[in-house]
Amino acid sequence: MELDDFKTLYQARFAQLPGKSDNDLTALLQKRSRTAVERIQYHLLWEIGIAIALALVLAVVLLTGTSTTLRWLGGFGLLICLVQVVSFGFQYRQLSRRLQPPAGSVKAHLTEIADLVRRFAGLYYRYTLISLPISFVFGGLIGATADDTDPAVSLVPAHMSLWQLGLLLLAAAGLMLGMVYFLKWYIHRLYGRYLTELERCLDELNEVPER
Amino acid sequence: MLSAPAFIQQIRQHQKIIHKVCHLYADSPEDREDLFQEILLNAWKANPGFRQEARFSTWLYQIALNTAISYLRKEKRRPRRTDLDPELHLPDAADPAEAQYADLYRAIGRLDKVDKALVMLYLDDYDYTTIGQMMGITPNYVAVKMSRIKQQLKQALQTA
């Protein structure tokens, strides 16, 4: 059977299909949408919510903590959380403004969605990768140097041997590597497969010039 | 832009377009229902930009295809290729034309998302220029791709 013979049967089958009533359609319009971009917006709101909750906890640590190091860590963490609330809030607004209904060509629509997903994944990755070490290193260093009698600092020996220092650096490097791999895995799980699928479709639409 | 009752009425008249897209792009009845809803919501959001002089069917087709191709499937539901929807296809075993129809429908269902869209538009008698505009490619490239797809489907039927 050729595609042109198939056409008649195909049209006839769909002509018989029972349709939805006005009430069914109106009810469907009341429900929530779940497009990829709306999912990104949902994630941004979720991240903002978590940052606010974390900021509150860190504010309590900052105000009531007895360890100077922990208070400095709390202070830097709080600052990072506030930056996250502002920057993710800004991204949310930008995304809402840029969000266009999918009425253009398939290629234009896929290009826009792929750009948005790529941009969000990149932003999330860079932000987390930069913010966590900054708060740990700066908060930890300032706190440790500000108060020598701090119980949190006293756990670390004053004069470390070479192997102790090596172990500490190894643990720090391990933590960083673990964080990087976890982030990559998490972002890939959220959007990686989807982005690959979009890019595959875009490749299909890219005309290869004949030689 | 259409008023809400006029929009609903137009959707009811042209809902076969959405059904066709949902049947080819979603495998299970739940996925089809979700996709139908997503297309409807996207059409409603795009309604303010709809120009009355444009053909509603072409406009709806564009939104339906864009939504289906960029649809983010729920994670819990793994993609799977189920058999033909019994509501649409009740092949009479004694009729070879029916069996061939079912085989070809399955082969179209296995095409990639972009090729599926091209076939759907072709089956609905859109010319290569309009298909090209809707897909964002040149009419020449539509012709090249359609020729490849027909070849691919022929091979799939031979091995079926």
Image (cartoon, rainbow, N blue to C red):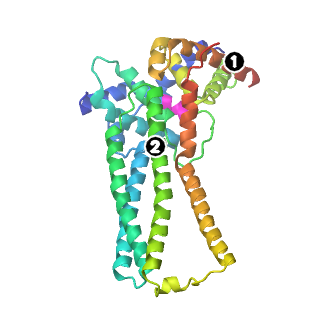
- Is residue B53 rendered to the left or right of residue B70? left
- Which part of the image, by quadrant, shows the C terminus of chain A? top right
Label 2: which secondary element: helix
Q: Residue at x 44, y 77 (%)?
A: A143
Question: Do the residues marked 2 and 1 share a common chain?
Answer: no
Which residue shows up at 64% across the image and 17% down it? B148
Amino acid type, label 2: Arg
Q: Are marks 2 and 1 in contact (CB under 8 Å)?
A: no
Task: Indicate the amino acid at tag 1.
Answer: Lys
- Which residue is the site of mark 1? B154
Judged from the image, the secondary structure of the residue bearing numbered disc 1 is helix
Give the quadrant of residue B12. top left
Q: Does residue A159 sit above or below B24 in this rendering?
A: below
**B26, above or below B98, in the image:** below
**Which quadrant is the N terminus of chain A positioned in?**
top right
Query: Which chain is indicated by disc 1?
Result: B
Q: Nearer the viewer, residue B108 or A207?
A: A207
Front in this rendered view, residue A66 or A146: A146
Residue behind mark 2: A119
Q: Is most of the magenta stretch helix, strand or loop?
A: helix
User: Where does the image place residue A113, in percent across and percent down from the top left?
Assistant: 45, 37
| Boundaries of the magenta span | B21-26
Residue A77 is marked as: none
Left-right relation of B7 to A168: left
Q: Quadrant of residue A183?
A: bottom right
Task: Tell me if residue B127 can be seen.
Answer: no
Residue A146 part of the magenta segment: no
Q: Position of residue A97 (x, y in %)?
A: 31, 40
Q: Position of residue A132 (x, y in %)?
A: 48, 63
Question: Would residue B55 appear left or right of A191 to someone viewing this image?
Answer: left
Residue at x 33%, y 50% (from the top left corner) = A90
Nearest to the observer: residue B31 or residue B42: B42
